[in-house]
Amino acid sequence: MEFFTKKDKNPINLVLIQWYNEIDEETMYGCLRLWLTCQYTCVYLDSVDMSVHIVARNNCENEYLVNKYIF
């Protein structure tokens, strides 16, 4: 999201983050298993330290893996 506060001022860049929780600290293929929550947070884009690659598990409802091998 990009908000403009005043004319000729730099915009405020925000990002909406949806959170995940771990599934009992279990791993699959060496990756954490996650489930998607209904919690959201809006933060400044510049405050995001790093991104992660999350992959949905096929044939599973609300189950995801953190792909730690891409970075």
Image: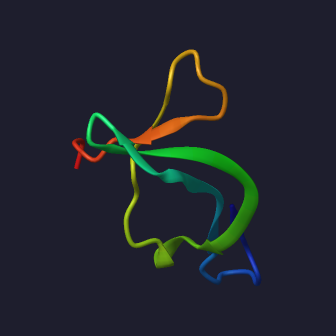
Q: Front-most of 13 and 52?
A: 52
Q: Quadrant of the N terminus?
A: bottom right
Residue 67 place in picture, x, y as percent: 33, 41
Q: Quadrant of residue 3?
A: bottom right
Residue plotted at (39% across, 52% down): 52
Q: Front-most of 34 and 47?
A: 34
Residue 39 place in picture, x, y as percent: 75, 61
Is the residue 21 above or below the residue 12 in the image? above
Residue plotted at (59% across, 54% down): 20
Residue 27 shows in this picture: yes
Q: Front-most of 44 and 8?
A: 44
Residue plotted at (46% across, 71% down): 48
Residue 24 place in picture, x, y as percent: 51, 53
Residue 38 place in picture, x, y as percent: 77, 53
Is the residue 61 above or below the residue 20 in the image? above
Residue 54 shows in this picture: no
Is the residue 52 above or below the residue 43 in the image? above
Left or right placement of residue 32 versus residue 12 in this view: left
Residue plotted at (57% across, 15% down): 59
Left or right placement of residue 18 versus residue 55 in this view: right
Is the residue 60 above or below the residue 9 in the image? above
- Total number of numbered labels? 0
Q: Give the colour scheme of this rendering.
A: rainbow
Q: Residue furthest top?
A: 59
